[in-house]
Image: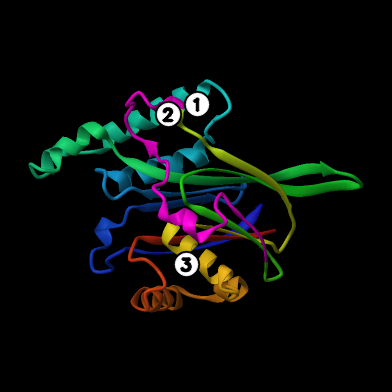
Amino acid sequence: MRYVCKTFSLAKDPSHPDEYEDAFDADPARGVAAIADGVSSSIFSGKWARILTRACLDECPPIESSAFFEWMALRRQSWETAIDPSQLTWHQKPKVGGGAFATLLWVEIDDCALAGGKSLRYRAFAMGDCLLMHVRQGALLGTFPLADSAEFLRDPMAVGSKDLGRDGQFRFLATKQHCQAGDLLILCTDALGAWAVSLIESGQAVDWISWWARDADDWRTLVVHERAAGRMRYDDTTVGILRIN
């Protein structure tokens, strides 16, 4: 396996977990992981987020070729099949025509040639404000695609479940970095990402090594506390922590 993984999540309103609209999927054997954040102002966005992360594991989006639009068409068909507009209220039904939206980030870990032998690398691709953080021995090596907390205040570009004639505006950012055994790759949705970057900017370090040791109750307690203190937004909050083998 390329990595081992721990994941934690908490709905914006813990008393209504059915309204959770994030998604995370991982395939340690193939070295692929994906995270998505459904846009709550659209309809059936949680289903769309889950379709996207699962599809990234089945076949990573070929964003650098025309085949990307074929890939998108298949995912959109899956969304149309998965939704049931008949149960919507009268004021929700008009939203179906506009489709669902989700931000998306995925990472692929593989071998690469390096002077003197082989190394590991990861390639990451993102549209929107899901965040990847690369940590080695407790030190943050970098973040992708955002590095400034102010960037989380902007409306992010998102992937749509319907062809509204704007697919040509899609812009996936990409990065490629070397990594090594023991490194942590943290994939998270924007509420946690904004919180972490704000802490970094204030000179405080997030102890990601201790996060690896946390259990689900510890995680929930921390998120609830940071929300109540006004340091983390009330939003669906998801993180997947990959420890490279």
Q: Which residue is mark 1?
A: 68
Give how far apart the Cα atoms at labels 3 and 1 are: 33 Å
Give how far apart the Cα atoms at labels 2 and 3 are: 31 Å
**Which amino acid type corresponds to the residue marked 1 in the rendered image?**
Phe
Q: Which residue is mark 2?
A: 72
Q: State which quadrant residue 85 falls in.
A: top left
What are the residue bounds of the magenta stretch? 140-168
Q: Residues within 10 Å of mark 3 (few under 14, many from 20)?
A: some
Is the residue 210 above or below the residue 177 in the image?
below
The location of residue 79, given as percent across then percent down, is: 31, 35
Is the residue 137 above or below the residue 134 in the image?
below
Q: Which residue is mark 3?
A: 195
**Which amino acid type corresponds to the residue marked 3 in the rendered image?**
Trp
User: Is disc 2 placed on a helix, strand or loop?
Assistant: helix
**Which amino acid type corresponds to the residue marked 2 in the rendered image?**
Met
The location of residue 213, given as percent across then percent down, is: 56, 75
The numbered mark, 3 or 1, whose residue comes first in the sequence reads 1
Q: State which quadrant residue 86 falls in.
A: top left
Q: Residue at x 58, y 69 (%)?
A: 200
Is the residue 225 above or below the residue 142 in the image?
below
